[in-house]
Image (spheres, rainbow, N blue to C red):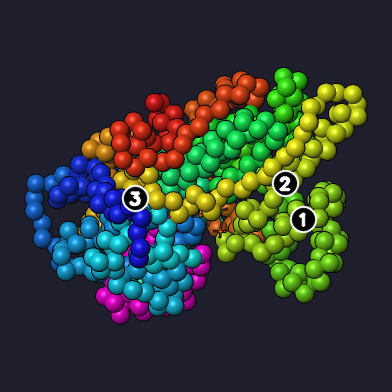
Amino acid sequence: MTKSALQIARAAYQPKVPVALKGQVEAVDGEYTQSVADQEEIKKLFPNTYGMPIITFEKSKEAVTLPAINVGVILSGGQAPGGHNVIAGLFDGVKAINKDSRLYGFILGPGGLVDHNYMELTADIIDEYRNTGGFDMIGSGRTKLEETAQFDKGLEILKELGIKALVIIGGDDSNTNACVLAEYYQSINAGVQVIGCPKTIDGDLKNEQIETSFGFDTACKVYSEVIGNIQRDCNSARKYWHFIKLMGRSASHIALECALQTHPNVCIISEEVEAKNLTLDDVVNQIAAVVAKRAADGNDFGTVLIPEGLVEFIPAMKKLIAELNDFLAKNEAEFKLIKRSEQRNYVISKLTKDNSELYASLPEGVARQLTLDRDPHGNVQVSLIETEKLLAEMVGNRLAEWKKEGQYVGKFASQVHFFGYEGRCAAPSNYDADYCYSLGYTASCLIASGKTGYMSSVRNTTASADKWVAGGIPVTMMMNMEKRHGEMKPVIQKALVKLDGAPFKKYASQREKWAVNTDYVYPGPIQYFGPTEVCDQPTKTLLLEQGK
Ligand code: FBP
Protein backbone atom coordinates (compact mmCIF):
# COMPACT_ATOMS: atom_id res chain seq x y z
CA MET A 1 0.00 0.00 0.00
CA THR A 2 1.53 3.37 -1.01
CA LYS A 3 1.24 5.84 1.83
CA SER A 4 1.27 9.62 2.06
CA ALA A 5 3.79 11.36 4.31
CA LEU A 6 0.97 12.16 6.74
CA GLN A 7 -0.11 8.51 6.83
CA ILE A 8 3.45 7.40 7.59
CA ALA A 9 3.81 9.94 10.39
CA ARG A 10 0.36 9.12 11.69
CA ALA A 11 1.08 5.38 11.85
CA ALA A 12 3.58 6.08 14.61
CA TYR A 13 1.03 7.96 16.76
CA GLN A 14 0.64 6.36 20.20
CA PRO A 15 -2.98 6.72 21.34
CA LYS A 16 -3.48 8.01 24.84
CA VAL A 17 -5.27 5.59 27.20
CA PRO A 18 -6.88 5.79 30.65
CA VAL A 19 -4.21 5.31 33.26
CA ALA A 20 -6.00 2.27 34.69
CA LEU A 21 -5.40 0.44 31.42
CA LYS A 22 -1.63 0.77 31.66
CA GLY A 23 -0.84 -2.56 33.30
CA GLN A 24 -2.91 -5.05 35.32
CA VAL A 25 -6.54 -4.13 35.96
CA GLU A 26 -9.32 -5.42 38.15
CA ALA A 27 -13.04 -5.13 37.47
CA VAL A 28 -14.92 -3.32 40.22
CA ASP A 29 -18.71 -3.80 40.38
CA GLY A 30 -20.80 -0.66 40.62
CA GLU A 31 -24.56 -0.24 40.86
CA TYR A 32 -26.90 -2.96 39.63
CA THR A 33 -28.88 -1.70 36.65
CA GLN A 34 -32.41 -1.50 35.22
CA SER A 35 -33.41 -0.86 31.63
CA VAL A 36 -34.32 2.78 30.85
CA ALA A 37 -37.97 1.77 30.31
CA ASP A 38 -40.22 -1.27 29.96
CA GLN A 39 -38.26 -3.07 32.70
CA GLU A 40 -40.60 -6.06 33.05
CA GLU A 41 -40.65 -6.90 29.31
CA ILE A 42 -36.87 -6.46 28.92
CA LYS A 43 -36.18 -8.56 32.01
CA LYS A 44 -38.32 -11.35 30.60
CA LEU A 45 -36.55 -11.23 27.24
CA PHE A 46 -33.04 -11.14 28.77
CA PRO A 47 -33.20 -13.38 31.86
CA ASN A 48 -29.44 -14.06 31.77
CA THR A 49 -28.07 -10.61 31.00
CA TYR A 50 -30.56 -8.27 32.66
CA GLY A 51 -29.77 -6.19 35.73
CA MET A 52 -25.98 -6.73 35.80
CA PRO A 53 -23.81 -4.10 37.52
CA ILE A 54 -21.85 -1.29 35.89
CA ILE A 55 -18.16 -2.21 35.80
CA THR A 56 -15.18 0.08 36.32
CA PHE A 57 -11.58 -0.98 35.76
CA GLU A 58 -9.06 -0.02 38.35
CA LYS A 59 -5.35 -0.60 38.52
CA SER A 60 -4.51 -3.87 40.22
CA LYS A 61 -1.28 -4.69 41.99
CA GLU A 62 -1.83 -8.39 41.56
CA ALA A 63 -0.22 -9.81 38.44
CA VAL A 64 -2.54 -12.52 37.09
CA THR A 65 -1.52 -14.86 34.31
CA LEU A 66 -4.45 -15.79 32.15
CA PRO A 67 -4.56 -18.48 29.49
CA ALA A 68 -4.46 -17.49 25.81
CA ILE A 69 -7.89 -16.64 24.41
CA ASN A 70 -9.18 -16.50 20.86
CA VAL A 71 -11.38 -13.50 20.13
CA GLY A 72 -13.49 -12.53 17.10
CA VAL A 73 -14.34 -9.01 15.98
CA ILE A 74 -17.05 -7.63 13.69
CA LEU A 75 -17.52 -4.13 12.27
CA SER A 76 -21.23 -3.50 11.79
CA GLY A 77 -23.14 -0.79 9.92
CA GLY A 78 -21.95 2.56 8.61
CA GLN A 79 -18.27 3.43 8.66
CA ALA A 80 -17.04 5.72 11.43
CA PRO A 81 -13.52 7.13 11.90
CA GLY A 82 -11.56 5.15 14.46
CA GLY A 83 -12.87 1.63 13.83
CA HIS A 84 -9.37 0.37 13.05
CA ASN A 85 -8.11 1.74 16.34
CA VAL A 86 -10.81 -0.16 18.25
CA ILE A 87 -9.46 -3.30 16.63
CA ALA A 88 -5.84 -2.27 17.34
CA GLY A 89 -6.69 -1.62 21.00
CA LEU A 90 -8.48 -4.95 21.21
CA PHE A 91 -5.52 -6.72 19.59
CA ASP A 92 -3.00 -5.17 21.99
CA GLY A 93 -5.36 -5.96 24.88
CA VAL A 94 -5.81 -9.64 24.03
CA LYS A 95 -2.05 -9.99 23.48
CA ALA A 96 -1.52 -8.42 26.91
CA ILE A 97 -3.84 -11.08 28.39
CA ASN A 98 -1.55 -13.68 26.88
CA LYS A 99 0.84 -13.30 23.96
CA ASP A 100 -0.53 -16.49 22.39
CA SER A 101 -4.07 -15.11 22.18
CA ARG A 102 -5.45 -14.72 18.67
CA LEU A 103 -7.78 -12.23 17.05
CA TYR A 104 -10.02 -13.10 14.10
CA GLY A 105 -11.90 -10.54 12.02
CA PHE A 106 -15.20 -11.51 10.40
CA ILE A 107 -15.37 -10.10 6.89
CA LEU A 108 -17.96 -7.55 5.71
CA GLY A 109 -19.93 -7.28 8.91
CA PRO A 110 -22.19 -9.65 10.83
CA GLY A 111 -22.75 -11.58 7.60
CA GLY A 112 -19.13 -12.80 7.89
CA LEU A 113 -19.99 -14.67 11.08
CA VAL A 114 -22.98 -16.39 9.51
CA ASP A 115 -21.14 -17.16 6.26
CA HIS A 116 -17.94 -18.25 8.05
CA ASN A 117 -15.97 -15.59 6.22
CA TYR A 118 -13.03 -14.54 8.38
CA MET A 119 -9.32 -13.79 8.55
CA GLU A 120 -6.80 -13.92 11.34
CA LEU A 121 -5.59 -10.44 12.30
CA THR A 122 -1.87 -10.64 12.87
CA ALA A 123 0.48 -7.93 14.15
CA ASP A 124 1.55 -7.04 10.58
CA ILE A 125 -2.02 -6.41 9.50
CA ILE A 126 -2.90 -4.43 12.61
CA ASP A 127 0.20 -2.23 12.23
CA GLU A 128 -0.81 -1.35 8.65
CA TYR A 129 -4.07 0.12 9.92
CA ARG A 130 -3.22 1.86 13.19
CA ASN A 131 -4.72 5.39 13.35
CA THR A 132 -6.23 5.11 9.87
CA GLY A 133 -9.80 5.87 8.86
CA GLY A 134 -12.19 3.44 7.19
CA PHE A 135 -13.30 -0.07 7.97
CA ASP A 136 -11.39 -1.69 5.10
CA MET A 137 -9.22 -3.89 7.31
CA ILE A 138 -12.11 -6.37 7.46
CA GLY A 139 -15.00 -4.45 5.88
CA SER A 140 -18.45 -3.79 7.30
CA GLY A 141 -22.04 -4.73 6.49
CA ARG A 142 -25.61 -4.30 7.61
CA THR A 143 -26.76 -7.93 7.91
CA LYS A 144 -29.06 -8.03 10.92
CA LEU A 145 -28.17 -10.84 13.32
CA GLU A 146 -31.55 -11.78 14.75
CA GLU A 147 -32.47 -15.34 13.88
CA THR A 148 -31.53 -18.29 16.07
CA ALA A 149 -30.44 -20.11 12.91
CA GLN A 150 -27.86 -17.32 12.30
CA PHE A 151 -26.63 -17.51 15.89
CA ASP A 152 -26.21 -21.29 15.62
CA LYS A 153 -24.44 -21.01 12.26
CA GLY A 154 -22.13 -18.41 13.81
CA LEU A 155 -21.45 -20.64 16.77
CA GLU A 156 -20.20 -23.39 14.44
CA ILE A 157 -17.32 -21.21 13.22
CA LEU A 158 -16.67 -19.75 16.67
CA LYS A 159 -16.26 -23.29 17.98
CA GLU A 160 -14.12 -24.34 15.03
CA LEU A 161 -11.74 -21.42 15.66
CA GLY A 162 -11.87 -21.83 19.43
CA ILE A 163 -13.25 -18.28 19.79
CA LYS A 164 -14.44 -17.60 23.32
CA ALA A 165 -15.41 -13.95 22.91
CA LEU A 166 -16.88 -11.85 20.15
CA VAL A 167 -16.66 -8.05 19.95
CA ILE A 168 -19.32 -6.32 17.87
CA ILE A 169 -18.50 -2.73 16.93
CA GLY A 170 -21.73 -1.03 15.92
CA GLY A 171 -24.51 1.48 16.46
CA ASP A 172 -27.68 1.15 18.51
CA ASP A 173 -29.25 -1.58 16.37
CA SER A 174 -26.05 -3.64 16.11
CA ASN A 175 -25.44 -3.41 19.84
CA THR A 176 -29.05 -4.46 20.44
CA ASN A 177 -28.33 -7.51 18.31
CA ALA A 178 -25.05 -8.07 20.17
CA CYS A 179 -27.04 -8.21 23.38
CA VAL A 180 -29.60 -10.64 21.93
CA LEU A 181 -26.67 -12.82 20.84
CA ALA A 182 -25.02 -12.59 24.28
CA GLU A 183 -28.29 -13.64 25.90
CA TYR A 184 -28.72 -16.55 23.51
CA TYR A 185 -25.16 -17.88 23.88
CA GLN A 186 -25.50 -17.57 27.64
CA SER A 187 -28.84 -19.38 27.63
CA ILE A 188 -27.41 -22.38 25.77
CA ASN A 189 -24.09 -22.33 27.65
CA ALA A 190 -22.24 -21.83 24.40
CA GLY A 191 -19.15 -20.55 26.20
CA VAL A 192 -18.91 -17.41 24.04
CA GLN A 193 -18.97 -13.91 25.57
CA VAL A 194 -20.30 -11.02 23.48
CA ILE A 195 -19.12 -7.43 24.02
CA GLY A 196 -20.32 -4.31 22.15
CA CYS A 197 -18.53 -1.07 21.25
CA PRO A 198 -20.39 2.23 20.63
CA LYS A 199 -19.83 3.28 17.04
CA THR A 200 -21.66 5.76 14.83
CA ILE A 201 -20.94 9.17 13.38
CA ASP A 202 -24.59 10.00 14.16
CA GLY A 203 -23.81 10.58 17.85
CA ASP A 204 -27.14 9.04 18.87
CA LEU A 205 -25.73 6.15 20.88
CA LYS A 206 -25.01 7.89 24.16
CA ASN A 207 -26.34 8.08 27.68
CA GLU A 208 -25.11 8.76 31.20
CA GLN A 209 -22.43 6.09 30.86
CA ILE A 210 -21.63 6.15 27.15
CA GLU A 211 -20.58 9.76 26.62
CA THR A 212 -20.38 9.60 22.88
CA SER A 213 -20.18 7.15 20.02
CA PHE A 214 -16.86 7.09 18.25
CA GLY A 215 -16.53 8.76 14.87
CA PHE A 216 -18.88 11.63 15.74
CA ASP A 217 -15.93 13.86 16.63
CA THR A 218 -13.97 13.33 13.41
CA ALA A 219 -16.99 13.34 11.08
CA CYS A 220 -18.28 16.63 12.54
CA LYS A 221 -14.82 18.18 12.24
CA VAL A 222 -14.60 17.17 8.58
CA TYR A 223 -18.08 18.51 7.78
CA SER A 224 -17.37 21.71 9.72
CA GLU A 225 -14.17 22.25 7.78
CA VAL A 226 -16.10 22.03 4.51
CA ILE A 227 -19.04 24.10 5.77
CA GLY A 228 -16.48 26.72 6.82
CA ASN A 229 -14.95 26.64 3.34
CA ILE A 230 -18.38 27.05 1.77
CA GLN A 231 -19.13 29.95 4.10
CA ARG A 232 -15.92 31.64 3.07
CA ASP A 233 -16.81 31.04 -0.55
CA CYS A 234 -20.30 32.46 -0.20
CA ASN A 235 -19.00 35.40 1.81
CA SER A 236 -16.55 36.04 -1.04
CA ALA A 237 -18.91 35.75 -4.02
CA ARG A 238 -22.03 36.90 -2.15
CA LYS A 239 -24.49 35.36 -4.59
CA TYR A 240 -25.57 31.94 -3.32
CA TRP A 241 -27.56 30.41 -0.54
CA HIS A 242 -26.10 27.01 0.27
CA PHE A 243 -28.49 24.32 1.51
CA ILE A 244 -26.34 21.71 3.23
CA LYS A 245 -27.85 18.43 4.37
CA LEU A 246 -25.83 16.56 6.96
CA MET A 247 -25.91 12.86 7.69
CA GLY A 248 -26.97 11.63 11.07
CA ARG A 249 -30.08 9.57 10.43
CA SER A 250 -32.87 10.58 12.87
CA ALA A 251 -30.99 12.66 15.39
CA SER A 252 -29.75 16.19 14.63
CA HIS A 253 -26.54 15.93 16.69
CA ILE A 254 -24.26 16.32 13.65
CA ALA A 255 -26.14 19.38 12.34
CA LEU A 256 -26.13 20.95 15.81
CA GLU A 257 -22.42 20.28 16.41
CA CYS A 258 -21.54 21.68 12.98
CA ALA A 259 -23.67 24.77 13.72
CA LEU A 260 -21.82 25.28 17.00
CA GLN A 261 -18.53 24.98 15.12
CA THR A 262 -19.35 27.19 12.13
CA HIS A 263 -22.21 29.64 13.01
CA PRO A 264 -24.39 29.22 9.89
CA ASN A 265 -27.32 31.55 9.16
CA VAL A 266 -29.87 28.79 9.73
CA CYS A 267 -29.68 25.33 11.25
CA ILE A 268 -32.85 23.28 11.45
CA ILE A 269 -33.04 20.93 14.44
CA SER A 270 -35.51 18.11 13.74
CA GLU A 271 -36.26 17.52 17.41
CA GLU A 272 -37.38 21.16 17.76
CA VAL A 273 -39.52 20.92 14.63
CA GLU A 274 -41.29 17.95 16.18
CA ALA A 275 -41.65 19.52 19.62
CA LYS A 276 -43.19 22.66 18.13
CA ASN A 277 -45.40 20.61 15.83
CA LEU A 278 -44.14 22.53 12.80
CA THR A 279 -45.29 21.75 9.28
CA LEU A 280 -43.04 21.62 6.23
CA ASP A 281 -44.51 25.02 5.32
CA ASP A 282 -43.48 26.46 8.70
CA VAL A 283 -39.89 25.32 8.15
CA VAL A 284 -39.88 26.84 4.66
CA ASN A 285 -41.28 30.13 6.01
CA GLN A 286 -38.61 30.27 8.70
CA ILE A 287 -35.79 29.88 6.21
CA ALA A 288 -37.38 32.27 3.69
CA ALA A 289 -37.78 34.90 6.43
CA VAL A 290 -34.03 34.76 7.15
CA VAL A 291 -33.24 35.01 3.43
CA ALA A 292 -35.49 38.09 3.11
CA LYS A 293 -34.04 39.69 6.23
CA ARG A 294 -30.48 39.27 5.02
CA ALA A 295 -31.51 40.53 1.56
CA ALA A 296 -32.80 43.73 3.20
CA ASP A 297 -29.23 44.24 4.51
CA GLY A 298 -27.84 43.61 1.03
CA ASN A 299 -26.70 40.08 1.82
CA ASP A 300 -28.03 37.74 -0.86
CA PHE A 301 -26.08 34.78 0.46
CA GLY A 302 -26.03 32.42 3.36
CA THR A 303 -25.91 28.88 4.68
CA VAL A 304 -28.65 26.56 5.88
CA LEU A 305 -27.82 23.32 7.69
CA ILE A 306 -30.41 20.58 7.43
CA PRO A 307 -30.32 17.33 9.41
CA GLU A 308 -30.77 14.25 7.27
CA GLY A 309 -33.71 12.93 9.31
CA LEU A 310 -35.81 16.12 9.13
CA VAL A 311 -38.79 14.74 7.22
CA GLU A 312 -39.36 12.05 9.83
CA PHE A 313 -39.74 14.72 12.51
CA ILE A 314 -42.37 16.83 10.82
CA PRO A 315 -45.33 15.38 12.73
CA ALA A 316 -47.59 14.88 9.69
CA MET A 317 -44.69 13.36 7.72
CA LYS A 318 -43.82 11.14 10.66
CA LYS A 319 -47.33 9.69 10.71
CA LEU A 320 -47.13 9.14 6.98
CA ILE A 321 -43.74 7.40 7.23
CA ALA A 322 -44.95 5.21 10.14
CA GLU A 323 -47.93 4.05 8.09
CA LEU A 324 -45.71 3.52 5.05
CA ASN A 325 -43.23 1.49 7.16
CA ASP A 326 -45.98 -0.81 8.43
CA PHE A 327 -47.72 -1.02 5.10
CA LEU A 328 -44.55 -1.80 3.13
CA ALA A 329 -43.36 -4.33 5.75
CA LYS A 330 -46.62 -6.22 5.35
CA ASN A 331 -47.11 -5.80 1.59
CA GLU A 332 -43.55 -5.72 0.30
CA ALA A 333 -44.04 -8.53 -2.21
CA GLU A 334 -47.21 -7.03 -3.68
CA PHE A 335 -45.66 -3.54 -3.84
CA LYS A 336 -42.66 -4.83 -5.75
CA LEU A 337 -44.92 -6.32 -8.42
CA ILE A 338 -46.54 -2.93 -9.15
CA LYS A 339 -45.10 -1.09 -12.17
CA ARG A 340 -42.87 1.83 -11.13
CA SER A 341 -45.13 4.34 -12.93
CA GLU A 342 -48.16 3.08 -10.96
CA GLN A 343 -46.55 2.78 -7.52
CA ARG A 344 -47.44 6.32 -6.47
CA ASN A 345 -51.17 5.86 -7.21
CA TYR A 346 -51.11 2.43 -5.60
CA VAL A 347 -49.70 3.92 -2.37
CA ILE A 348 -52.19 6.81 -2.48
CA SER A 349 -55.06 4.31 -2.78
CA LYS A 350 -53.87 2.24 0.20
CA LEU A 351 -53.09 4.89 2.81
CA THR A 352 -55.53 6.36 5.31
CA LYS A 353 -57.14 9.67 4.26
CA ASP A 354 -54.77 12.27 5.82
CA ASN A 355 -51.65 10.35 4.96
CA SER A 356 -52.88 9.69 1.45
CA GLU A 357 -53.51 13.43 0.89
CA LEU A 358 -50.11 14.41 2.25
CA TYR A 359 -48.37 11.75 0.17
CA ALA A 360 -50.23 12.95 -2.94
CA SER A 361 -49.08 16.55 -2.27
CA LEU A 362 -45.36 15.68 -2.21
CA PRO A 363 -43.11 16.28 -5.22
CA GLU A 364 -42.72 13.10 -7.26
CA GLY A 365 -39.06 12.58 -6.33
CA VAL A 366 -39.59 12.81 -2.57
CA ALA A 367 -42.70 10.58 -2.74
CA ARG A 368 -40.65 7.93 -4.54
CA GLN A 369 -37.76 8.21 -2.07
CA LEU A 370 -40.17 7.52 0.81
CA THR A 371 -41.10 4.13 -0.63
CA LEU A 372 -37.59 2.94 -1.40
CA ASP A 373 -36.30 -0.20 0.33
CA ARG A 374 -35.95 0.05 4.11
CA ASP A 375 -32.61 -0.78 5.68
CA PRO A 376 -32.35 -4.23 7.31
CA HIS A 377 -33.61 -2.72 10.57
CA GLY A 378 -36.84 -1.50 8.93
CA ASN A 379 -35.83 2.20 8.89
CA VAL A 380 -36.50 4.57 5.99
CA GLN A 381 -33.13 5.27 4.37
CA VAL A 382 -33.21 8.97 5.15
CA SER A 383 -29.89 9.56 3.43
CA LEU A 384 -31.72 8.91 0.14
CA ILE A 385 -34.33 11.63 0.68
CA GLU A 386 -33.19 14.86 -0.95
CA THR A 387 -34.49 17.29 1.69
CA GLU A 388 -31.88 19.89 0.74
CA LYS A 389 -33.32 20.12 -2.78
CA LEU A 390 -36.88 20.03 -1.49
CA LEU A 391 -36.23 22.95 0.87
CA ALA A 392 -34.18 25.00 -1.61
CA GLU A 393 -36.97 24.65 -4.16
CA MET A 394 -39.75 25.42 -1.69
CA VAL A 395 -37.90 28.44 -0.23
CA GLY A 396 -37.38 29.77 -3.78
CA ASN A 397 -41.12 29.39 -4.47
CA ARG A 398 -42.09 31.07 -1.19
CA LEU A 399 -39.80 34.04 -1.88
CA ALA A 400 -41.32 34.38 -5.36
CA GLU A 401 -44.78 34.52 -3.76
CA TRP A 402 -43.66 37.17 -1.28
CA LYS A 403 -42.09 39.15 -4.09
CA LYS A 404 -45.41 39.12 -5.97
CA GLU A 405 -47.04 40.46 -2.84
CA GLY A 406 -44.59 43.39 -2.99
CA GLN A 407 -42.05 42.30 -0.37
CA TYR A 408 -38.35 42.89 -1.02
CA VAL A 409 -36.66 39.49 -1.06
CA GLY A 410 -33.44 40.28 -2.94
CA LYS A 411 -31.95 37.84 -5.42
CA PHE A 412 -32.18 34.21 -4.45
CA ALA A 413 -29.95 31.57 -6.03
CA SER A 414 -29.23 28.28 -4.31
CA GLN A 415 -26.65 25.50 -4.28
CA VAL A 416 -27.32 22.16 -2.62
CA HIS A 417 -24.90 19.81 -0.85
CA PHE A 418 -25.10 16.60 1.09
CA PHE A 419 -22.22 15.76 3.43
CA GLY A 420 -22.12 12.29 4.84
CA TYR A 421 -19.87 9.80 3.12
CA GLU A 422 -17.11 12.44 2.92
CA GLY A 423 -16.57 12.26 6.67
CA ARG A 424 -17.20 8.67 7.58
CA CYS A 425 -13.80 7.30 6.67
CA ALA A 426 -11.61 10.30 7.51
CA ALA A 427 -8.42 9.64 9.43
CA PRO A 428 -9.54 9.77 13.07
CA SER A 429 -8.87 12.93 15.02
CA ASN A 430 -6.63 12.54 18.06
CA TYR A 431 -9.80 12.37 20.15
CA ASP A 432 -11.25 9.48 18.14
CA ALA A 433 -7.88 7.74 17.77
CA ASP A 434 -7.43 7.78 21.56
CA TYR A 435 -11.06 7.05 22.43
CA CYS A 436 -11.31 4.15 19.98
CA TYR A 437 -8.05 2.53 21.00
CA SER A 438 -9.19 2.79 24.63
CA LEU A 439 -12.62 1.32 23.81
CA GLY A 440 -10.97 -1.67 22.10
CA TYR A 441 -8.51 -2.19 24.92
CA THR A 442 -11.35 -1.93 27.48
CA ALA A 443 -13.28 -4.58 25.52
CA SER A 444 -10.33 -6.94 26.04
CA CYS A 445 -10.47 -6.22 29.80
CA LEU A 446 -14.20 -7.05 29.85
CA ILE A 447 -13.38 -10.30 28.08
CA ALA A 448 -10.60 -11.12 30.56
CA SER A 449 -13.07 -10.47 33.40
CA GLY A 450 -15.51 -13.01 31.93
CA LYS A 451 -18.23 -10.44 31.10
CA THR A 452 -20.90 -10.81 28.45
CA GLY A 453 -23.75 -8.55 27.30
CA TYR A 454 -21.67 -5.47 28.15
CA MET A 455 -20.75 -2.43 26.11
CA SER A 456 -17.22 -1.12 26.40
CA SER A 457 -17.26 2.31 28.00
CA VAL A 458 -14.65 5.05 28.39
CA ARG A 459 -15.84 8.09 30.36
CA ASN A 460 -14.70 11.56 31.44
CA THR A 461 -13.18 12.09 28.00
CA THR A 462 -13.23 15.88 28.11
CA ALA A 463 -10.49 15.63 30.76
CA SER A 464 -6.96 14.62 29.84
CA ALA A 465 -6.69 10.91 28.97
CA ASP A 466 -4.98 10.01 32.24
CA LYS A 467 -8.29 10.90 33.96
CA TRP A 468 -10.48 8.80 31.64
CA VAL A 469 -12.48 6.04 33.31
CA ALA A 470 -12.68 2.66 31.59
CA GLY A 471 -15.40 0.12 32.25
CA GLY A 472 -18.46 -1.73 30.96
CA ILE A 473 -22.18 -1.02 30.86
CA PRO A 474 -24.80 -3.79 30.61
CA VAL A 475 -26.47 -3.31 27.23
CA THR A 476 -29.91 -4.18 28.66
CA MET A 477 -29.62 -1.00 30.74
CA MET A 478 -29.98 1.11 27.57
CA MET A 479 -33.02 -0.74 26.20
CA ASN A 480 -36.72 -0.05 25.77
CA MET A 481 -39.48 -1.54 23.63
CA GLU A 482 -40.11 0.05 20.22
CA LYS A 483 -42.10 -0.80 17.12
CA ARG A 484 -39.92 -2.23 14.32
CA HIS A 485 -41.27 -3.76 11.11
CA GLY A 486 -44.73 -3.49 12.68
CA GLU A 487 -43.76 -5.45 15.85
CA MET A 488 -42.70 -4.41 19.36
CA LYS A 489 -38.98 -5.22 19.88
CA PRO A 490 -36.38 -4.58 22.58
CA VAL A 491 -33.95 -1.96 21.25
CA ILE A 492 -31.35 0.44 22.60
CA GLN A 493 -33.04 3.80 23.05
CA LYS A 494 -31.77 6.32 20.49
CA ALA A 495 -30.43 9.53 22.03
CA LEU A 496 -31.98 12.50 20.23
CA VAL A 497 -31.04 16.15 20.69
CA LYS A 498 -32.42 17.32 24.04
CA LEU A 499 -34.07 20.71 23.74
CA ASP A 500 -33.30 21.41 27.38
CA GLY A 501 -29.68 20.28 26.94
CA ALA A 502 -26.75 22.69 26.97
CA PRO A 503 -25.71 22.25 23.28
CA PHE A 504 -29.16 23.13 21.93
CA LYS A 505 -29.59 25.97 24.43
CA LYS A 506 -26.26 27.42 23.36
CA TYR A 507 -27.32 27.32 19.72
CA ALA A 508 -30.78 28.76 20.49
CA SER A 509 -29.19 31.66 22.36
CA GLN A 510 -27.05 32.60 19.36
CA ARG A 511 -29.13 31.76 16.31
CA GLU A 512 -30.88 35.09 15.82
CA LYS A 513 -27.53 36.83 15.76
CA TRP A 514 -26.03 34.24 13.40
CA ALA A 515 -29.09 34.49 11.11
CA VAL A 516 -28.63 38.15 10.31
CA ASN A 517 -24.97 38.86 10.96
CA THR A 518 -22.30 37.16 8.97
CA ASP A 519 -20.54 35.68 11.97
CA TYR A 520 -19.08 32.62 10.24
CA VAL A 521 -16.34 30.53 11.82
CA TYR A 522 -13.89 28.73 9.53
CA PRO A 523 -12.59 25.79 11.59
CA GLY A 524 -10.09 24.57 8.97
CA PRO A 525 -8.88 20.97 8.63
CA ILE A 526 -8.32 18.54 11.49
CA GLN A 527 -4.81 18.96 12.91
CA TYR A 528 -3.02 15.82 14.04
CA PHE A 529 0.27 17.32 15.20
CA GLY A 530 0.66 20.48 17.19
CA PRO A 531 -0.53 22.19 20.37
CA THR A 532 -3.11 20.32 22.39
CA GLU A 533 -5.69 23.14 22.21
CA VAL A 534 -5.61 22.77 18.42
CA CYS A 535 -5.32 18.99 18.14
CA ASP A 536 -7.03 17.39 21.11
CA GLN A 537 -10.32 19.25 21.48
CA PRO A 538 -13.45 17.12 21.90
CA THR A 539 -16.72 18.19 20.28
CA LYS A 540 -18.49 21.32 21.48
CA THR A 541 -21.51 19.10 22.15
CA LEU A 542 -19.60 16.98 24.66
CA LEU A 543 -17.92 19.97 26.29
CA LEU A 544 -21.27 21.73 26.75
CA GLU A 545 -22.95 18.53 27.98
CA GLN A 546 -20.27 18.28 30.63
CA GLY A 547 -20.67 21.91 31.63
CA LYS A 548 -17.38 23.02 30.07
P1 FBP B 1 -24.72 3.65 11.45
O1 FBP B 1 -25.93 4.03 12.24
O2 FBP B 1 -24.69 2.24 11.05
O3 FBP B 1 -23.46 4.07 12.15
O4 FBP B 1 -24.77 4.47 10.09
C1 FBP B 1 -24.62 5.83 10.06
C2 FBP B 1 -24.99 6.41 8.73
O5 FBP B 1 -23.85 7.10 8.22
C3 FBP B 1 -26.19 7.34 8.81
O6 FBP B 1 -25.81 8.65 9.19
C4 FBP B 1 -26.76 7.26 7.43
O7 FBP B 1 -28.14 7.56 7.41
C5 FBP B 1 -26.51 5.83 7.05
O8 FBP B 1 -25.36 5.43 7.77
C6 FBP B 1 -26.28 5.62 5.58
O9 FBP B 1 -26.23 4.26 5.32
P2 FBP B 1 -25.43 3.56 4.15
O10 FBP B 1 -23.99 3.61 4.52
O11 FBP B 1 -25.92 2.16 4.16
O12 FBP B 1 -25.70 4.33 2.91
Q: Label 2: how many residues lie within 10 Å, few (<14), some (14-19) or many (20+)?
A: some
Query: Label 3, on which residue?
Result: 6
Name the image quarter holding the N terminus.
Answer: bottom left
Q: Residue at x 49, y 65 (%)?
A: 141
Ligand 1 - quadrant of the structure image:
bottom right
Between discs 1 and 3, the one toward the N terminus: 3
Q: Is residue 514 left or right of residue 38?
A: right
Q: Which of these two is toward me, 135 or 61? A: 135
Span colored in magenta: 142-171
Q: Which badge, 2 or 3, is on the more N-terminal residue?
A: 3
Label number found at residue 30? none
Q: For the point 69% across and 42% down, which residue is it?
A: 415
Tags 2 and 1 touching, CB below 8 Å: yes
Name above or below for residue 306 compared with residue 546: below
Residue occupied by mark 2:
389
Quarter location, residue 323: bottom right
Q: Looking at the rendering, in which quadrant would you find the C terminus?
A: top left
Say whether marks 1 and 3 touch (CB < 8 Å). Answer: no
Residue 300 position, x and y percent, is: 72, 28
What's the residue type where badge 1 is placed?
Gly
Under tag 2, what secondary structure? Answer: helix
Residue 159, magenta (yes or no): yes
Q: Which residue is mark 1?
A: 365
Q: CA distance from mark 2 to mark 1?
A: 10 Å
Query: Which amino acid type corresponds to the residue marked 3 in the rendered image?
Result: Leu
